[in-house]
Image (spheres, rainbow, N blue to C red):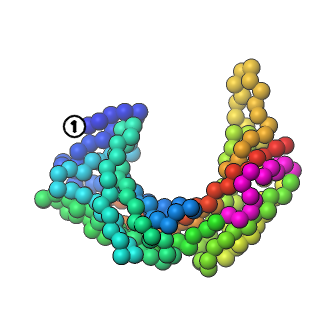
Amino acid sequence: MAVVLAGCSTVESKDIRTSGITANYVVTLPETAEVARVSASYRVGTLTFVELGDGESVRSSGGGKEVELERHHTAGVTDYTGELNGVVQAGTEITFDLTRGKGDDSAPRSTVKLPERVRLTAPLAGTTYSRRAVIPVRIATGPSDLPSILTWTGDCIQPDSLELEPGRTSATIPPGSLRPSLATPTPGVKPPTSCPVNLTLTRRTEGTLDKSFKNGHITAETQSVRRITSTP
């Protein structure tokens, strides 16, 4: 049976071999909580998701904690989520263990290590900056050999990003980096020249997927977001 909605569909796993599945595992460290949020999804093709059947499950473990992920359906998408409370230490290895039904291969060891967490200490949320001015950026973080990516998005600007090399705890967004949006305005509606802008700092690690899968990705990331106002 397949559930179809909004271009995506979900099929039952019983007729799908593990070797034909694309797995996507993500570990997220939220800025304001001492928890690792874990998620898993499985696909065949681009828009067809796989729902695990009877006797099948996906578990995640790390830092002495373990959780069985819960299934969710949204707009034709099936995924699985859970939380590892208190598991935030950089370098902690997180493992995803997919148990399949009788007669198919399980995939017990997809692993990724947690990155050092990041936190934007400047600019402060709610501050206003002209696009003609420098925006100072300061970061609180422990030692890390991983780069970070600073991105900015908003209704009145073009999305863009800046890569920060490992070890950086400060940077500047040069004047003119936040460029006015090129979106076609709605007829009769004056496009905004000022708007809220989200500055998002991300540090991400790549892990190793279990060899039983066809392909896929496993990542762990930490993010810090500050909303400022951008003016001409």
Q: Is residue 190 above or below residue 94?
A: above
Task: Residue at 56% x, 73% y: name it.
Answer: 116
How far across and how far down the image is residue 65, in percent? 35, 71
**Side of 232 where 138 appears, left or right:** left
Task: Residue at 67% x, 71% y: name it.
Answer: 140
- Quadrant location of the N terminus? top left
Residue 44 sits inside the magenta stretch: no
Residue that numbered label 1 is attached to: 1
Q: Residue furthest top?
A: 188
Which residues, given as a range, are shown in magenta? 120-132
Task: Residue at 32% x, 64% y: name it.
Answer: 67
**Side of 111 where 107 appears, left or right:** left
How far across and how far down the image is residue 127, in percent? 78, 52
At label 1, which amino acid type do we have? Met
Q: Is residue 62 visible?
A: yes
Q: Residues within 10 Å of mark 1 (few under 14, many from 20)?
A: few
How far across and how far down the image is residue 54, in percent? 17, 51
Q: Is residue 9 above or below residue 148?
A: above
* Quarter-of-image position of residue 4: top left
Q: Is residue 104 above or below residue 170?
A: above
Between 108 and 81, the one nearer to me in the picture:
81
Task: Residue at 69% x, 39% y: name it.
Answer: 155
Label 1: which secondary element: loop
Residue 121 sits inside the magenta stretch: yes
Q: Residue furthest right?
A: 132
